[in-house]
Image: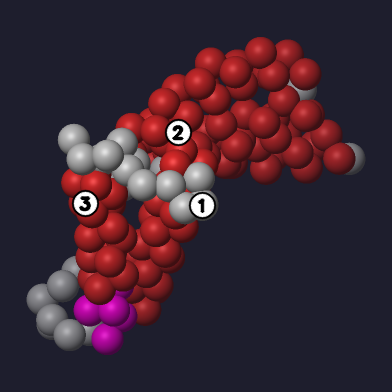
C-alpha cells in the first residue's frame, strides 16, 4: 500500500514539476522531489535522481549567484503576491478569472517563490553569507 501511495504522489509531483518547467515556478525542484518519491516506490526510477539533482542544484546556485538575480526573484515573488491580492479583491473588473480562487493561487506561488529563494540563498551562501555582485 505504501508503494502505491508513494508512486501516485511521486507521479503527480513529477507531472506538476514538468508543467512548471514551462510555467512560472520551481519545476526542476518538483521533478526532483517527485523522482525521489517514485524512487522509493519503484527502485529502478532512483537512477534518474542524481542527474536531476545535479541540474536542480545548478539552478539553485544560479538563482542566487548575484544580487541582481536575487532582487529580480524577490520582485517577482512580491509581484505575484500583489497580483493575487488584485485578482482576489476584483480590483480591476476586466481581469479574467477574477476572484479568490485565482488570487490565492497567485499568492501561494509568490510565497513558494520567496520560500525557495530563502532556502536557495541559505544553501548556497550559508545563514549569514553574502552574495557577490555580477
Taking the image as drawn, is residue 18 in sight? no
Answer with the quarter of the image where residue 134 lies: top left
Where is residue 128 drawn, in percent x and y?
47, 53
Q: Is residue 116 magenta?
A: no
N-term-proximal mark, 1 vs 3: 3
Q: Is residue 107 above or below residue 127?
A: below
* Secondary structure, magenta segment, majority class: helix
Q: Mark 1 or mark 3: which is in front?
A: 1
Observer-nearest of 11 and 70: 70
N-term-proximal mark, 1 vs 2: 2
Q: In the picture provided, is 2 more to the left or to the right than 132? A: right
Q: Secondary structure at mark 2?
A: helix
CB atoms of marks 1 and 3 within 8 Å: no
For this orientation, the residue located farthest to the right is 1
Q: Secondary structure at mark 1?
A: loop
Answer with the quarter of the image where residue 14 lies: top right
- Disc 2: CA contacts within 10 A as few (<14), some (14-19) or many (>=20): many
How far separated are the C-alphas under marks 1 and 2?
23 Å
Where does label 3 land, which residue? 72
**Residue at point 59%, 41% (across, down):** 12
| Disc marking residue 127 | 1
**Residue at point 72%, 25% (across, down):** 39
| Disc marking residue 28 | 2
How far separated are the C-alphas under marks 2 and 3?
19 Å
Amino acid at each position: 500500500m505504501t508503494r502505491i501511495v508513494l508512486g501516485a504522489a511521486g507521479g503527480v509531483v513529477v507531472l506538476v514539476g514538468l508543467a512548471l518547467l514551462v510555467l512560472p515556478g520551481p519545476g526542476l525542484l518538483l521533478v526532483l522531489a517527485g523522482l525521489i518519491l517514485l524512487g522509493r516506490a519503484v527502485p529502478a526510477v532512483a537512477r534518474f535522481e542524481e542527474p536531476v539533482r545535479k541540474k536542480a542544484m545548478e539552478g539553485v546556485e544560479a538563482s542566487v549567484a548575484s544580487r541582481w538575480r536575487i532582487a529580480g526573484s524577490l520582485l517577482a515573488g512580491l509581484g505575484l503576491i500583489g497580483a493575487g491580492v488584485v485578482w482576489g479583491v476584483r480590483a480591476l473588473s476586466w481581469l479574467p478569472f477574477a476572484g479568490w480562487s485565482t488570487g490565492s493561487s497567485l499568492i501561494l506561488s509568490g510565497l513558494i517563490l520567496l520560500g525557495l529563494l530563502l532556502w536557495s540563498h541559505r544553501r548556497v551562501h550559508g545563514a549569514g553569507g553574502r552574495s557577490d555582485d555580477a
